[in-house]
Image: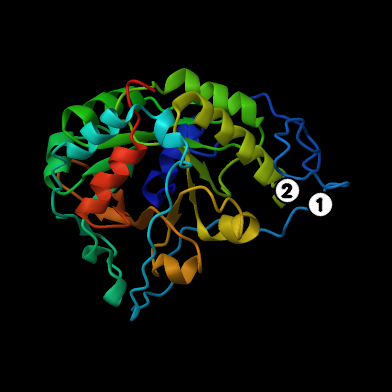
């Protein structure tokens, strides 16, 4: 989900299409310390707005490669509350999904900037996938599937008025090629959470078998929206957005984030939500100590037949049986 250097030239002409670029002329408020007007009551609002945390400059530079010698593993968190299983469909539907033959293709990707993760290498995990947006251009999904893409998260929206122009094409083509697919939204800090939730819901269909929706939260130095709300405001806006999506899709959203944003806002927060973590030089257990995760984005420089240029590579936290069980529990049922 990172903005690649190879597309900096395109940024000058197509910034509105980039995640985090200026996606609307309507901003929430000029004052970055203004408290959000939305509330769920689940996050206590401070009496006075806390000062924004000092934020590091956005960078996609990779740290020096580090060889990992530990392979600490954590079981993935459930994507939904225990009561959500009933919400996702009758027990028969859950059993049917679990019994489906979900063929797992072995990883055959290459990497332009390979990292030695040592004993904690993502290669040791069975179920690999990708995330894509307009910047991958035309994708041969059948070829990409044959290279080991078992799932795909597809950029759908950012802010309250931008739709990725390749979303619908990728959404249908990925399914036709046999991938499990879901949609993600890049959260824009200069729009209200309710507007953004409504925009995502308007553009991403509720369909059987879809993976849970994803909220992508990170700092982006390329955006003209320089607003960095306080931690309390960040958590409240996220909560509003995620609760709206869960109510609509019947699935608990997944939180995608990067190290700097996590450090500023998410340590210790949302323990009852599943996480998708970016960690391109070290295992997530080193970058996000103590945080359980479902997906790990381990590379932003993947290479594969079916895609021109680089692509983000991801892996599911579990073996093939755990993958099938997770799909049965988390994939949307047509009866929900």
* Nearest to the observer: residue 253 or residue 224: 253
Residue 271 percent across, percent down from the top left: 55, 54
In the rendering, which numbered label is found on residue 58?
none
Residue 230 in view, yes or no? no
Q: Are marks 1 and 2 in contact (CB under 8 Å)?
A: yes
* Nearest to the observer: residue 116 or residue 82: 82
Check disc 2: other Cα within 10 Å, few if <14, some if 14-19, many if 20+: some
Residue 229 percent across, percent down from the top left: 72, 46
Residue 291 percent across, percent down from the top left: 49, 62
Q: Measuring 35% from the left and 35% from the top, which residue is drawn there?
A: 182
Eyeballing the image, is 330 above or below 294?
above
Q: Measuring 18% from the left and 55% from the top, which residue is drawn there?
A: 109
- Mark 1: which secondary structure? loop
Eyeballing the image, is 106 above or below 122?
above
- Mark 2: which secondary structure? helix
* Nearest to the observer: residue 196 or residue 137: 196
Residue 221 percent across, percent down from the top left: 58, 49
Is residue 42 found left or right of 315 in the rendered image? Answer: right
Quadrant showing the C terminus = top left
Is residue 286 found left or right of 136 in the rendered image? Answer: right
- Badge 1 is on which residue? 50
Q: Measuring 46% from the left and 72% from the top, which residue is drawn there?
A: 286
Find the distance from the CA under tag 1 to the CA under tag 2: 8 Å
- Which-is-in-front pick, marks 1 and 2? 2
Check disc 1: other Cα within 10 Å, few if <14, some if 14-19, many if 20+: some
- Badge 2 is on which residue? 232
Is residue 165 found left or right of 126 in the rendered image? Answer: right
Lower position in the chain sequence, tag 1 or tag 2: 1
Eyeballing the image, is 254 above or below 190?
below
């Amino acid at each position: 989900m990172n903005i690649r250097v190879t597309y900096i030239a395109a940024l000058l002409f197509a910034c509105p299409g980039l995640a985090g670029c200026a996606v609307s002329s309507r901003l929430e408020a000029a004052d970055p310390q203004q408290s959000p007007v939305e509330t769920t009551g689940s996050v206590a609002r401070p009496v006075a707005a806390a000062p924004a945390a000092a934020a590091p400059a956005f960078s996609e530079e990779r740290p020096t490669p580090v060889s990992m010698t530990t392979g600490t593993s954590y079981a993935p968190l459930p994507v939904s509350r225990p009561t959500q299983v009933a919400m996702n469909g009758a027990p028969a539907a859950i059993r049917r999904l679990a019994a489906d033959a979900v063929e797992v293709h072995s990883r055959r990707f290459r990497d332009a900037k390979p990292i030695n993760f040592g004993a904690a290498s993502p290669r040791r995990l069975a179920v690999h996938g990708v995330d894509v947006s307009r910047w991958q251009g035309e994708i041969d999904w059948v070829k990409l599937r044959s290279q080991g893409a078992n799932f795909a998260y597809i950029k759908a929206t950012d802010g309250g008025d931008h739709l990725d122009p390749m979303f619908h094409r990728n959404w249908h083509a990925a399914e036709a090629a046999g991938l499990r697919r879901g949609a993600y939204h890049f959260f824009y800090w200069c729009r209200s959470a309710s507007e953004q939730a409504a925009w995502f819901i308007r553009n991403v269909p509720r369909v059987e078998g879809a993976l849970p929706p994803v909220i992508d939260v990170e700092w982006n130095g390329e955006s003209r929206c320089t607003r960095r709300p306080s931690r309390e405001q960040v958590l409240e806006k996220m909560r509003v957005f995620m609760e709206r999506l869960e109510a609509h899709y019947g699935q608990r959203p997944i939180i995608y984030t990067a190290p700097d944003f996590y450090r500023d806002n998410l340590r210790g927060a949302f323990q009852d939500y599943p996480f998708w973590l970016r960690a391109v030089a070290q295992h997530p257990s080193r970058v996000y100590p103590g945080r359980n995760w479902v997906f790990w984005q381990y590379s932003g420089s993947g290479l594969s037949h079916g895609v021109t240029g680089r692509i983000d590579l991801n892996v599911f936290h579990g073996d093939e049986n755990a993958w099938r069980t997770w799909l049965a529990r988390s994939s949307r049922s047509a009866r929900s």
